[in-house]
Amino acid sequence: MYKTLYGLFDKAIYALDTNAGTGKIFPKWLMTSISTFGLGFQLLIIAVLLVLGLKAIILPFFLGYTFMVFVFIGIRKVFY
């Protein structure tokens, strides 16, 4: 089940950044930022938005939030 759900995401990342599996060790701030894309943190964001009554914001937020994947790929390509 994991490979089905996350395998395509991993393949997409490796297609965008062919050197993703190699390189220097990343700084802690970058790894912390990247970890916000994990399912647990995303569920927390959804829960907070629901509690605050911002149901209509959830989808637009995550559409914009997904753009940050490209920002992190750019940071990794340029600096690491």
Image (cartoon, helix red, strand yellow):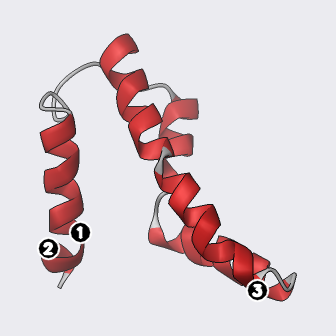
**Vertical arrangement, residue 4 with respect to residue 74, above or below:** below
**Vertical arrangement, residue 5 with respect to residue 29, above or below:** below
- For this rendering, which residue is in front, 68 or 6? 68
Instruction: Give the amino acid at mark 1.
Output: Tyr
Residue furthest right in the image: 52
Residue occupying the point 29% across, 19% down: 24
Q: Which mark is residue 50?
A: 3
Q: Earlier in the sequence, mark 2 or mark 3?
A: 2
Q: Position of residue 18 (x, y in %)?
A: 12, 32
Q: Quadrant of residue 50?
A: bottom right
Measure the C-alpha gap from mark 2 to mark 1.
5 Å
Q: Quadrant of residue 76?
A: top left
Instruction: Give the amino acid at mark 3.
Output: Leu
Q: Which mark is residue 60?
A: none
Q: Position of residue 54 (x, y in %)?
A: 80, 80
Quick one: SS at disc 1?
helix
Horizontal side, residue 25 vs residue 19: left or right: right
Q: Residues within 10 Å of mark 3 (few under 14, many from 20)?
A: some
Q: Where does the C terminus fall, quadrant-wise?
A: top left
Residue occupying the point 16% across, 35% down: 21
Q: Which residue is mark 2?
A: 3
